[in-house]
Amino acid sequence: MASLWVLMALAASLSSSVRCVQIYSLDGQWEAYETNVGYKFEANVPGGAYTDLMNVGIIQDVFFGYNDNSSRWVGYNNWSYTKIFDVTSAQLGHNQVNLVFEGLDTFAEIIVNDVSVGTASNMFVRHIFDVREVLQAGTNNITVFFENPVEVGQRLYNEQVQQYRIPPECPDEAYRGECHVNMLRKMQASFSWDWGPAFPSVGIWKSVYLELYDLSAIRYVLTDVVEKDENTWSLKINTYFAGNDENIVRGTLNYSLTVEDGTIAESTLFAAKADQYGEITFDMTSLDVPKDKVKLWWPNEYGSQPLYELVVRYGSVQEDTVDEKRVKIGFRTVELVQDDLDNGATFYLKVNGVPIFAKGSNEIPINILPELGQDKKTIRNLMESSRDVHMNMLRVWGGGVYESDYFYEVADELGIMIWQDFMFACALYPVGEDYLESVKAEVNHNVKRIYSHPSIVVYSGNNENEGALVDSWYNTNDNYDLYKRDYVKLYIDTIKTEFDRITDGRGIFVSSSPSNGKETETEGWVSKTPGSSIYGDVHYYNYVLDPWSSTTYPVPRFCSEYGYQSLPFEATWRTATNDSADLDINSAFMDYRQHHPQGNDQMQDLILQKLNIPSKDSQFYTSAFIYLSQVLYSQAIRVETEHYRRYRSYLNDAGEGYTMGALYWQLNDVWVAPTWSSIDYTGRWKMLHYLARDMFSPIIVTAHIGYNRNLQLYTVNDELESVQATLVSKVFKYDSADFKPISETRTDLTLNAAASQLIEEFNIDDHLTSLNCGDQGSADQNCFYHFVLEKDGDVFSPQNYLFPGKLKDSNLPLSTVKATSISEAGTNTFDIVISSDNIAIFVWLDVDQIQGRFSHNGFLLVESSKTVSFSSEQSITLQELQEALTVTHLKDPRWL
Ligand SMILES: *[C@@H]1O[C@H](CO)[C@@H](O)[C@H](O)[C@H]1NC(C)=O
Ligand SMILES: *[C@@H]1O[C@H](CO)[C@@H](O)[C@H](O)[C@H]1NC(C)=O
Ligand SMILES: *[C@@H]1O[C@H](CO)[C@@H](O)[C@H](O)[C@H]1NC(C)=O
Ligand SMILES: *[C@@H]1O[C@H](CO)[C@@H](O)[C@H](O)[C@H]1NC(C)=O
Ligand SMILES: *[C@@H]1O[C@H](CO)[C@@H](O)[C@H](O)[C@H]1NC(C)=O
C-alpha cells in the first residue's frame, strides 16, 4: 500500500513550514454543578463528583463510617462540568482542532459554546471531538453533562427487557449495591461487589486537552517482538495516525531504538490512507535487531527486566518533525502451552522458551473511585509488595478498569507478568448493535494502548461469564441457546476478532477466566464443563471443607483464583471509624462492611474447625477474632498454594496435575472491610502477605497429609538449575520447654531444576508413636513437624511446618512471648528481639498505626529468641516503636 502513496506524497509539496502537534491541557480547575439541589462548586480534572464533593466539604470522606451510604445520592443525580478557556486565532489556524477526553465516566453529552459536539457512553474509550468550527478566537466554554448511571442502567434494562432479560438484575442484597451495572460500559465494581462499596461515579476521570495539528498526529505505536531467526529479533511496529481532511497521511517515519551499545535507526518515506476500518496506519514490517545488541526481558526472579526505548518520529515530507511517541520495549517471547496429555492438556506460560510457574494474585481496581486509581504511590507499593514476596504475575480482574499506563510500566520494570481480563465480570451482557460497536472501540483503544508492554502476557475475554452461563447462575437455562449465541457474539465475534485483527493474530487470548483453553474452542466456545481440572484454568472457593487440608483442593492445570476472607487489623479499622463501639465483630458497623453473604458466619465456622475463639465476653474477643481470621485464611492459602506447587511435576491417577499457576484472590482492597485481600486498604500487609513470601519462595520444602494419614514431604525448586541442599526435619513436642526437638534428621538432597519432588512418605501416626509422642490416639496432639533446607550450614528456605492433628486440641502451652529488646539498626530501621518461654505459633507483631514492614511476621518460634527487623515508612523514634509494639500468638495468655 505504501509505495503508490509515496509518489503522491513527494509530488504534493504542502506548506513550507510545518507545525508540530500541539497539546493544550484543559486539566485543572473546572466548575461543577448539580441540577436538582443546585450545588455549584469548584472541581478538579481529572476527577469525579465524589472526589470534588469531598474536596469542597459537601460530603465527608466517603471511605469513612457509613459515608458511602449517606453520599449515595451523588450517584442518583446529574452533574455538569464546565470550563471557560481562551483560544487564540493562531491556534484556530491549524487544519485540525480536536477536543480529546482520555476518559469520561460514563454517560455524557459534550457541549462547546452551546453546540453539542458529541456524546459518550463507555468509560474505557478515548473520545476525540472535532471542535474547529465550534471554537472561536477569544473566550470559549465546554460543558460536559453527565447523566447519572443508576438511572441510565435502569432505562437501558427497561428497553432491553422488552425483548428478553439480561441478568443479573441486581447484586445480592448483602452487597448493598445498585442494579443493572451490566447494561453499562463502566467499572462493574462501581455498583458494589462482595468486597467493596457502591459508588456510582461520574466524572472526567482522565486528562482532557485540545490537540492541534496540520497534517496528522501519531495516535498509537503498537509494537511486538517476534523471533526472526536464531540471531535476530524482528521488532514489529505499527504506527496509527489521526485522521485529517483528506484521510491520507504521508511524510517520513524515523525509528530509533536505543540498544546496548548505540542505536538502531531506520528512516522511511511513507503514505497511508484510511483503510476499511477507518484507521490510518503504517505497518513497517519490522526493525531488525541483532539479538546480541539487547538482553532478554524476564519475569521476576528469572532474570532482569531491561527495557529499550524506541522513538518513533513522524515528519512532514520536508522532514520537519510533526509528532513523536516513545515506547519501552522488552525483548521476550511468550507462549501459552496447551500440549495434549492422555487426559486433557497442559496449560502454562513459556517465556523465552522457559516454562514459568505463575505465582501471584488478582488485582481489583486500584481505587473504587476511578479518578483516584492512577495514584502512583499506591500502584508502586502494590507492585513492589508483589515483587517482594516472589510473585511474578498479577491478574487484572475483569470487574475493574484497564489500568493506567503507569501500572503497566511498573509491571514491565519489576517483571510482574500481567493476565489482562477484558472488563466483563460475573454477568450476562447485552449484544445490541450500539453496545457491540462500543465494545469494539473499547478493545481497539485499550489493546493499542497497552499491548506493547512486555509484562502483559495473556488476555482473557471476561471473568467467570462462561461459568455463569453454563451453570445458570442467573436462571438462564430456559433460554440457553439465545444466551449462548450472545456469549459467542460478544467475546468471540467481537472482542476476539478485534483483538486478533489488531495483534495480527499473535496476541494470546483465552475466552474467559476460567476456561478450558483450547478445549473450550473445540466445544464451540462454551464448554459443558468450564470448571474442568484437566483443561485451562480454574477458580476454586470452598468455605465448608477443612481449609488446612490439601485434600480439600482440586488438582487443576492452573488456579487463577482461590481464597478466603479475613478481617483487617484494628489499626486499619480505626482509619474508617472513630467510634470504639464499632470495633466489635458483632457491631452494626462491621456487619455493614461485610458484603459477602454469610461472610462472618463462614469465617467463624472455618476458624472453629481449626482453632478456638475466646469467649464473647472477653475484652479481647474482637482482636482475637481478627487475628484468628488472619491465621485461618493465611494458613489455608499457604496450604492450597503449596498443594498447587507440589503438583508442578506430577499427575495423579485421574491425569490431573502438572499445575503451573497459583494466583490467589485477592491482592488489594478498595475500602476497610472483611475481604480476601493480603494487603489492606491502608497498604498494610496482612498476615497472608507475609506468608506469601514463604509459600512463593523459589525453593521450598513442603509437607502435607494425604490419604491414609500419610505424610508426604516434597521440595519444589522453581530455579533453572539443580540445587544441592540438606533437608533438616525436626519433630517438636508442643510443650518442649527447652526448644529441643525430639527428633532431628538431616538428609542430603539434589533438588532438580524447575521441578517438584516427592522426597519421602510415611504414616504419620506410626512415625509419631515410634518417637514416643504418645499413643495412636494422642500422638498427633503432642508433636508437630518443622522443616528447613540448609546449604553449607545456612538455612536458605523459609521455615515450614505441619500440624498432624487439630491445633485447637493440641497440647500447645500458654507461652509468654515478648519483645525483649529493640535497637536502632539504621534510619527508621529497628532490630526487635522476640523471646519466649516456650514454643509459640503464628507469632504476630503489630505496630498499630505505624506503617512499615517486618522482615518476618506470623512465624513459628521454635527457639527461645529471634531477631526480627522492622523498617518504618515514616520517621519514628525507638520509643514510639516500643510503645506501639504488641506481640500476639496462638496461645496468647491474655485471651485464654
Ligand atoms: C443508608 O441510607 C438510607 C437512605 O438515606 C437509610 O435509610 C439507611 O438507614 C442507611 N443505612 C445505614 C446502614 O446507615
Ligand atoms: C438526569 O438527566 C436526565 C436526562 O436529561 C433526566 O431525564 C433525569 O430526570 C435527570 N435525573 C435527575 C435525578 O435529575
Ligand atoms: C458558553 O458560550 C456560549 C457561546 O458563546 C454562550 O452563549 C454561553 O453563555 C457560554 N456559557 C458559559 C457558561 O460561559
Ligand atoms: C529522520 O532522519 C533523517 C536522517 O537522519 C533526518 O534528516 C530527518 O530530519 C529525520 N526526520 C524526523 C522527522 O525526525
Ligand atoms: C476521627 O478522629 C480524628 C482524631 O481525633 C479526627 O482528626 C477526625 O476528624 C475524626 N474523623 C471523623 C470523621 O470524625
Image (cartoon, rainbow, N blue to C red):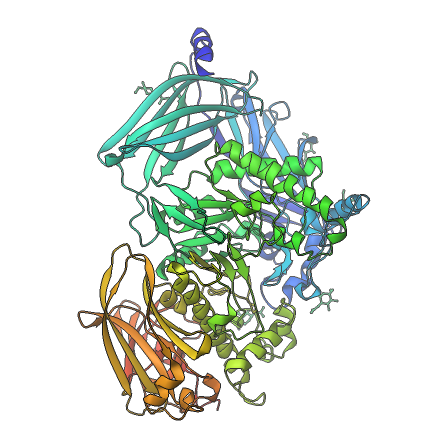
Q: Where's residue 275, x and y in %?
A: 55, 21
Q: In which quarter of the image is residue 314?
A: top left
Residue 645 seen in render: yes
Identify the residue shown where x is 39% and y is 69%: 690
Identify the residue shown where x is 47% and y is 41%: 508
Left or right: 767 as drawn, with respect to 14: left
Q: Where's residue 78, x and y in %?
A: 71, 47
Residue 79 seen in render: no
Q: In the displayed image of the protein, which residue is found farthest to the left? A: 792
Identify the residue shown where x is 48% and y is 34%: 503
Ligand 3's quadrant: top right
Q: Where's residue 132, x and y in %?
A: 60, 24
Residue 625 vertical position relative to residue 643 in the rendered view, above or below: below
Left or right: 806 as drawn, with respect to 184: left
Residue 240 vertical position relative to residue 341 in the rendered view, above or below: above
Q: In the displayed image of the protein, which residue is found farthest to the top? A: 11
Left or right: 127 as drawn, with respect to 834: right
Q: Which is nearer the eye, 699 or 774?
A: 774
Q: Quadrant of residue 892?
A: bottom left
Left or right: 646 as drawn, with respect to 789: right
Total count of labels: 0
Q: Which is nearer the eye, 572 or 603?
A: 603
Q: Where's residue 711, x and y in %?
A: 39, 76
Residue 558 vertical position relative to residue 809 in the rendered view, above or below: above
Residue 398 vertical position relative to residue 95 in the rendered view, above or below: below
